[in-house]
Image (cartoon, grey):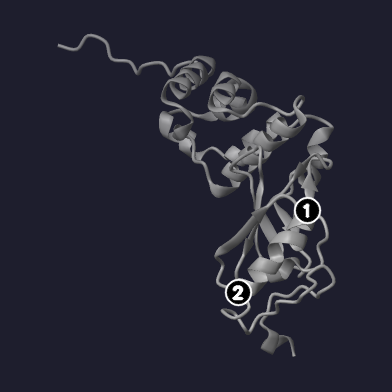
Amino acid sequence: MELVSRPLARPAAELLAAALAAGLRQAGLDLLTWTPAARSLRQRLAFCRQALGGPWPEVTDDALLAAADRWLGPELAAARRRADLARIDVVGALRRLLPWPQAGRLDELAPERVEVPSGSRVRVDYADPAAPVLAVKLQETFGWQQTPRLADGRVPLLLHLLSPAGRPVAVTADLASFWRTGYPQVRGELRGRYPRHPWPEDPVTAAPTRHTTHRRR
């Protein structure tokens, strides 16, 4: 026999947000959807923190979970269930951590892509915040005399110079030294294997190219 029937009251928004935040801290950041863009932004922020220190934020798992209310506050307030966390725009949320006014310099200090002498815009890999990597075909870097540097000149890019087939032939953070000491050996080994690609004696004054010698004519 049912005496009284009434719907359960919806939990207060603040309590629900607190419960979701607690669940996130317990289960971890994998409850969020980390798109390539979100991972890239997080890695760039980690690089800025490593290279420049504060006020650039810590973005380790522990730091992000501890600061969840700060960068995920509006999304947690709007969420009603755990599944809602997977729909959060993580890029937009992470941008709340950007310090002002330094935020306007993120693309300058830690660019997503770097233009190489051939004109290609090549993506930088920030997976290791201490040594960002630029993987680029060697012929596209002809004319570069010095290794590009990020974070106001503090950190040189680690260049992964690739063969025409896209395989690494050299890794260097000192391009000037590579041209002097490493390139002659690479040239000697590969110009017979890739005769359709240019292998000039002086790469510093040679024209960079994305194409074979035949296509450049």
Point 79% across, 40% down: residue: 151
Vertical relation: 6 (above or below) 208 = above
* Residue 126 appearing in the image: yes
Q: Which mark is residue 147?
A: 1
* Residue 159 appearing in the image: no
What amino acid type should be assigned to the residue bearing mark 1?
Answer: Thr
Using residue 101 as the reference point, say whether residue 79 is left or right of it: left
Quick one: quadrant of the C terminus? bottom right
Q: Residues within 10 Å of mark 2 (few under 14, many from 20)?
A: some
Q: Which mark is residue 28?
A: none
Label 2 residue SS = helix
* x, y percent for residue 98: 73, 32
* x, y percent for residue 66: 57, 19
Point 33% across, 15% down: residue: 6
Q: Mark 2 points at which residue?
A: 190
Using residue 201 as the reference point, say whether residue 35 is left or right of it: left
Q: How crowded is mark 1: few (under 14 residues within 10 Å), some or many (20 or more)?
A: some
Using residue 182 as the reference point, say whether residue 144 is left or right of it: right
What amino acid type should be assigned to the residue bearing mark 2?
Answer: Leu
Vertical relation: 177 (above or below) 91 = below
Using residue 24 as the reference point, say whether residue 171 is left or right of it: right
Image depth: mark 2 or mark 1 in front: 2
Looking at the image, the residue that sits furthest to the left is 1
Say which quarter of the image contains residue 209.
bottom right
Instruction: Measure the C-alpha gap from mark 2 to mark 1.
Output: 22 Å
64 or 124, which lies in front?
124
* x, y percent for residue 207: 80, 75
